[in-house]
Image (cartoon, rainbow, N blue to C red):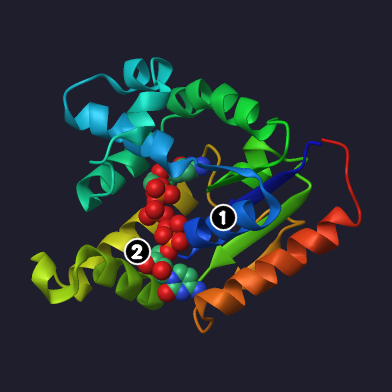
Amino acid sequence: MRFTVAIDGPAAAGKGTISRAIAARFGFQHLDTGLLYRAVGRRVLDGAPALIAASTLRHRDIARDDLRTQAVAEAASQVAAIPEVRAALVEFQRDFARAEGGAVLDGRDIGTVICPGADAKLFVTASAEVRARRRFDELGGEASGTDYETVLAEVRARDARDMGRADAPLVAAEDAVVIDTSDLSIEAAVERAVEAVLAASAQPRNT
Ligand code: CDP
Ligand code: CDP
């Protein structure tokens, strides 16, 4: 059985949380594609040329535990605007999407570019203020050494870059189900996502 779920949306909207829940519920494999761009961004911060970092990316690079910082997120969104970097990462993602037993991929361009024929597409979003608050809390709140306003500015800058780039900009696919999690608990957001996947599975498409 092959079934692909594409989940896109801006930073800290809840894509990962929903993706993991969908994967667990339906027994699908999950790929957080942001980790690919983060791993390339990490290697660029270490001095590697972006295209070399992207074309030699290995599975173990995306398992590194130093990919979650704001500096790496920023570097990721800069390398993600380079068309050759994106092209070098396409095959890895499409191979994953074809996994026997079903796959969930989350990112920015899964439903539009990587898997336009995905069986189910979700666009998960929330206001920039809510997302910045979540990211600030994840970083450790006041104890993190940063402040909410700084995180909000970073979230907005990354949104602008991800939505404004020419190649694979962040945009909802026309056939995506939009879930705004600004006022939703995690449980309620997951429930909506599960419903959307079940509804899509009642009308399978050819991928
Ligand atoms: O993957 P993405 O960056 O879109 O977001 P995430 O890592 O799934 O979620 C970011 C943070 O928001 C996490 O700490 C989640 O627990 C939290 N969250 C939330 O408070 N309410 C939701 N409906 C979804 C996520
Ligand atoms: O966790 P968060 O949502 O903050 O970011 P992420 O999903 O780890 O993605 C980091 C950066 O990688 C994004 O800001 C995008 O610029 C880029 N990215 C992308 O261009 N396309 C994807 N499919 C996934 C991530």
User: Does any portion of residue 11 appear in the rendered image?
Assistant: no
How many C-alpha atoms fall within 10 Å of the one at disc 2: few (<14), some, or many (≥20)?
some
Q: Which amino acid does label 1 sit on?
A: Ser
Residue 91 x %, y %: 59, 22
Instruction: Identify the residue position indicated by label 2 in the image.
Output: 156
Q: What residue type is labelled 2?
A: Arg
Q: Residue at x 24, y 28 (%)?
A: 44
Q: Residue at x 34, y 27 (%)?
A: 61
What numbered label is drawn on residue 19?
1
Could you give the CA–CA distance between mark 2 and mark 1, rounded to whole angstroms? 23 Å
Label 1, ligand 1: CB separation under 8 Å = yes
Using the image as rendered, state which of residue 37 and residue 58 is in the foreground. 58
User: Does any portion of residue 207 appear in the rendered image?
Assistant: yes
Using the image as rendered, state which of residue 94 and residue 49 is in the foreground. 94
Q: Is 163 positioned to the left or the right of 5 in the image?
A: left
Q: Residue most toward the bottom?
A: 183
To which quarter of the image does residue 22 belong? bottom right
